[in-house]
Image: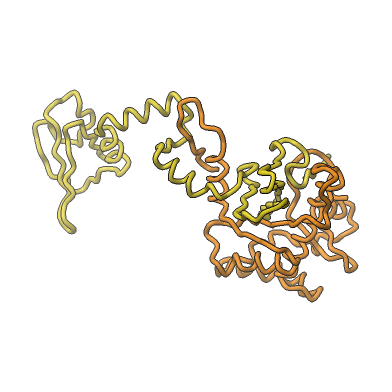
Chain colours: A orange, B yellow
Amino acid sequence: MAWETSTYQTPSTLTYHKGKLLWGAKLERLVRRCEIPEAEVLRHFKLTLHTHESLKTLKEKVEVIPEKHNKTIYDLYADYMHELVATMKRRVFNDNILGPAYNAQTIPVDIIVGAPQSWSPQENRALIEAAKKLGMNSCTVVGEALCAAAFHFTKDIDVAGERWLQVGN
Amino acid sequence: MVAVAKMSRTAHAVVPPRGKKHKISVDENPDEAEYQPDGMTNDDTKTLSSQRVPRAKKRKTYRDNQGPDDDEYRSRDQENDSTKTPVSQHSARLLSKHLRSLVVATSTESNVVDQSEAPGPRLCIALDIGTTLTKGAFQFRNTAEKSVYQPKSDQWPGRLAPTKLHPH
């Protein structure tokens, strides 16, 4: 199980090992124990969706590993998102957060993926295609800047009746 | 020696047309004109042929000469956090209206934003697949009951992936 403690993030790393997808903290642990070679670990794969020429060298590095497993970068994203969603659902329903009336098999799940605001529709398309491969009924790609704005504008208004945007958020 | 001309409140820089020499008028008040290029007096208006006024100096002088609005904002910044930018009520209303169909975010970096109004219970999962870190959040909505369940940001498992990055 990839979840261990109470921090709220996981490394964006994954690899295919003996036909199985390993990712996140569990993969990091295996790398530290030298059970998985560091060279096989995919890191920074998000950058491969960028079309900018300056990332060409990095792209070539990253794209080697999925090709070994006959995977495209879209397959890789789909697999990774599948693991993330499955883990999330498992947590929500196994811990019985929503009560007995709902179960993981029947409830519709919508996926919302944040993407850099500067991404082109073509780059966003990769995320949607990955979600479609998962069979998700709905996938929305939202700009990260919009997410930050939505977060702030749905918070309580401060005492002076004004809203504030934190620089850098 | 590089001469630096500090312009006083009433001094002004004349931006010459391309190819012409730079000309600076210096204020008559000797107290305000603290630094003068060699050989210049306060009464003189001279053409500086070889010295250029640093851009930062000019900008500072320009800001200093701004009206009370700037002072007002500066004092507000001092009262509040200087890293925050005020947003007018009108702008806030406009943006809130635009964002009304979007459902609340759970954290700044890992947001649940849902645009669908489909009836019935739905689980909305937000993913933020970053370059080095992945974050996530979920929200449960039931439009039939007009209820939204969203854990507090620090409440497990309101966010995805409570994973220790570098356990030692």
Q: Is residue B1 something that shows in the picture?
A: no
Q: Is residue B133 left or right of residue B28?
A: right
In depth, the one of A56 and A108 nearer the eye is: A108
Residue A55 in picture, x, y percent from top left: 60, 66
Outermost residue to the front: B144
Q: Is residue A124 left or right of residue B148?
A: left
Q: Is residue A18 left or right of residue B143?
A: right
Residue B37 in picture, x, y percent from top left: 20, 36
Residue drawn at x 81%, y 59% as measured from the top left:
A38
Please say if B132 is above or below B67: below
Residue A137 in picture, x, y percent from top left: 70, 63
Residue drawn at x 80%, y 58% as measured from the top left:
A83
The quadrant of the image that shows the C terminus of chain A is top right
In depth, the one of A60 and A105 nearer the eye is: A105
Q: Is residue A95 left or right of residue A114?
A: right
Q: Quadrant of residue A156?
A: top right
Residue A19 in picture, x, y percent from top left: 88, 68
Please say if A24 is above or below B93: below
Please say if A70 is above or below A4: below
Residue drawn at x 60%, y 47% as measured from the top left:
B103
Q: Quadrant of residue B29?
A: top left
Residue drawn at x 71%, y 41% as measured from the top left:
B149
Q: Is residue A19 something that shows in the picture?
A: yes
Q: Number of numbered discs present?
A: 0
